[in-house]
Amino acid sequence: MSPNSLPLLLLAQLLLHLVEITAKVPAIIIFGDSSVDTGNNNYIPTIARSNFMPYGRDFIGGQPTGRFCNGRLATDFISEAFGLPPTVPAYLDPTYGIKDFAAGVCFASAGSGYDNATSDVLSVIPLWKELEYFKDFCGELKAYQGEAKAQETLSEALYIISLGTNDFLENYYTVPGGRRSQYTVEEYQDFLIGIAEGFVREIYQFGARKVDLSGILPMGCLPLERATNPMMGACNELYNQVAWNFNSKLQCLIKKLNGELQGVTIVYSDVYRLFLDVLQKPSTYGEFG
């Protein structure tokens, strides 16, 4: 098994525990960054692309697709597990249409974040534009399925939202004179949480009732952060603490929204603990290679 695909499979396994909100799932609808982008960045002018080898070496046909992964993403496995197609198409991929998107669609863009300024760093699709694409999709779905059927699809679909890491690593801690000069890290976390709340409320207005909101992983243990750490490859514990605190605030937001939005079920995906466990006890998860 590839070392890149193992954590994704574990994430897929985690999300499959969402039985409380997924008794019926006719479609998967995805927003986010490179953790869930199935190829949208192939169709925009950005350097944040993965449409070249070795990406995709374990994908069907062994070809890169724009997924930042050696094979399928966690969301692809989730789709297949619910009896839907084994891969979720990117909304901007012209080889797909509404017939395909009716069972699953991805609006995510690698390099994006909650903060619009984050998407500016690599000229990728900002979250507000992902939302606009989603609204276009809703109109297309109603034209294809009819008003009543489309509304049923939208209300029964599983919505997956996965982003936040880039807001800190590509924006807050990287851009000189940017958000770090405007906010303390705690204030910036609150700023992002406010955007997340507004986003969930917006898709709720369009029918979203089953939502998975993913936390961010221990970003101080990502390869680049470890490679640039003066402590000789150790994790950047400051970044990890920032991620932990952000996730705590995200969980508070989820509790709040579950109490305020009628008929909604929002669950939190704890990718932080999952990835940290893989890093700390790799032998528990089998052989890599």
Image: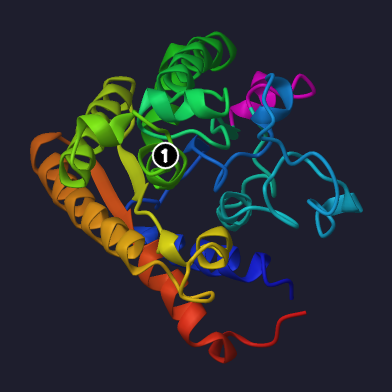
Mark 1 secondary-structure assignment: strand
Q: Residue at x 56, y 85 (%)?
A: 282
Provide residue 212's location: percent of width, then percent of height: 36, 48
Q: Is 102 placed left or right of 244 in the picture?
A: right
Span colored in magenta: 91-102
Dividing the picture into quadrants, the one containing residue 96 is top right
Q: How crowded is mark 1: few (under 14 residues within 10 Å), some or many (20 or more)?
A: many
> In the figure, 166 relative to 284: above or below?
above
* Whether residue 149 is visible: no
Magenta-span inclusion, residue 93: yes
Of the pair 246 and 130, the residue shown nearer to us: 246
Left or right relative to 82: residue 165: left
Q: Is 216 a magenta residue?
A: no
- The x and y percentages for residue 175 are 42, 34
The residue positioned 17% from the left and 39% from the top of the image is 190
Query: Residue pushed farthest front?
Result: 230
Q: Name the residue under label 1.
A: 159
Amino acid type at mark 1: Tyr
State whether residue 76 is above or below residue 228.
above
